[in-house]
Amino acid sequence: MAQDKSPEAKTRRPRAETPKGFRDYFGAEVTERKAMLDKVAEVYHRYGFDPLETSAVETVEALGKFLPDVDRPNEGVFAWQDEDADWLALRYDLTAPLARVAAQFRNDLPSPYRRYAMGPVWRNEKPGPGRFRQFYQCDADTVGAPSVAADAEICAMLSDALETVGIPRGDYIVRVNNRKVLNGVMEVAGVLDPANPNRFATERGIVLRAIDKIDRLGETGVRALLGEGRKDESGDFTKGAGLAAEQAEVVMAFMAARRDSGAATVARLRELVGTSVTGGEGVAELETIAELLDRQGYGSDRILIDPGVVRGLGYYTGPVYEAELTFEILDEKGRKRQFGSVSGGGRYDDLVKRFTGQSVPATGVSIGVDRLLAALRAKGRIGTDTAGPVVVTVMDRDRMADYMGMVADLRNAGLRAEVYLGNPKNFGNQLKYADKRQSPVAVIQGGNEAEKGVVILKDLILGAQIAQNATLEEWKDRPAQVEVPRADLVAAVRKMLAK
């Protein structure tokens, strides 16, 4: 059989699909995100923070990612080698670029430097349900303030931001802990040697991950990970930290240290850290944070001291915090569960030091934008205003200038409007287009209407309601289509939109 040698047969067309682990954002999603971030920015601005936009690309060296000994350093980041042999990568968060900026422009920036940043970040990780390789973050940081008053301020600002975007008090809690306290407990448990911080590093990593999983695995699962290890339901085995029973008991007591008040929790933590100098410093810092927040009116119904907060990033050096949404949603299997964390952060006094060699105190918080948007949708706080533009239909293509004049009048009056720019031959297709655009009103003017100096306004929202379930009396009381003078176009459209 003869082969097809036509040019079409030789051309391989690209597949029209989003790369694995990435997604596209359409109109309403982008609009909702911008509206939410604008509200967050108002809060940050009120607190005296300035916006900062950094490059999406940083050098791998500046990002400071722990990389494997391979030719292509791509663990956790999307990296490539530039023509001058430098390795570059997409930023994996907004904090590492801030550290570079703070070091690079340290002679020009005020100290302390307070900034917020919003934008996409990229992580070269295995994607999964709801887990993408590109996602949005919204950060606020203070660089150059050693006092934990800066940490308390960040927590208060995070609380205000959540309430401003639509998460009411009682549906969230900001939980605060301190890495120094955790290190003190590790010291008491025998898995941290102050004289040799690198000793027991593997065991400490396992302990940290175990503590972070207490909500999911429960006390029994965490105890197993602190000991020899844990086998899950599928039979997979996770190696444990190998702690003795008495060592594990110290860690378990730490996780159970939360009391009814911040003062009681701090007192229990002071008992647990014993004579550890580092642990004692951490307890004192938590005590100060609790006092500062209390004086500003942020009680335990909004912000509380909770030893269960760990945070995964290794550069935290002091207070750490996490905002958790406490209302229930249904998971993919229809089971009730709490929504969970939407934000986290902490103090990272050694990050800028990588560039300058001098310790520069810093603290900050990051909001997971997509997570917070999902929470607001679950609460019904966004997604209700999805109206598209007013659509001016085209009855006579030779009169396009008249239709453009109409849409200009609407736009100049501050109304969202567009002219139908497809093939105007089939008027039904124009109305289908308006429906697909979720347009509230269609403007119609044929030759007869033009001679009379009028336009027809079609209420598309009411028309859809009438088609579904409106009564005859409702239809007579408010017709879905009216004729108005061309000179009254803007006022008539405003009136119809107001209804």
Image: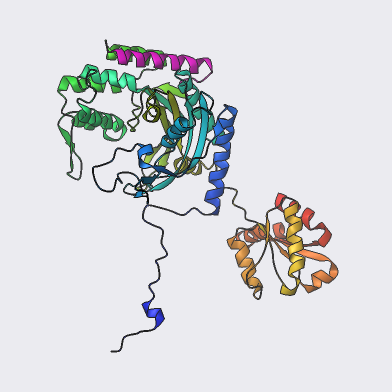
Magenta-tinted stretch: 276-301
Residue 330 position within the rendered picture, expressed as x and y whole percent measured from the top left: 40, 43
Taking the magenta stretch, the answer to whether it contains residue 299 is yes
Q: Is residue 232 left or right of residue 468?
A: left
Q: Residue at x 77, y 62 (%)?
A: 405
Q: Report the coloring of the rendering.
A: rainbow
Q: Is residue 143 visible?
A: yes
Residue 437 versus residue 108 in the image, above or below? below
Residue 163 versus residue 274 in the image, above or below? below
| Predominant SS along the magenta part | helix
Residue 425 position within the rendered picture, expressed as x and y whole percent measured from the top left: 66, 76
Q: Quadrant of residue 2?
A: bottom left
Q: Residue at x 31, y 48 (%)?
A: 126
Residue 8 position within the rendered picture, expressed as x and y whole percent measured from the top left: 41, 79
Residue placed furthest toward the top: 275
Q: Is residue 170 visible?
A: no
Taking the magenta stretch, the answer to whether it contains residue 310 is no
Residues 428 and 120: in front is 120
Q: Is residue 218 left or right of residue 446?
A: left
Which of the image's four quarters has the N terminus?
Answer: bottom left
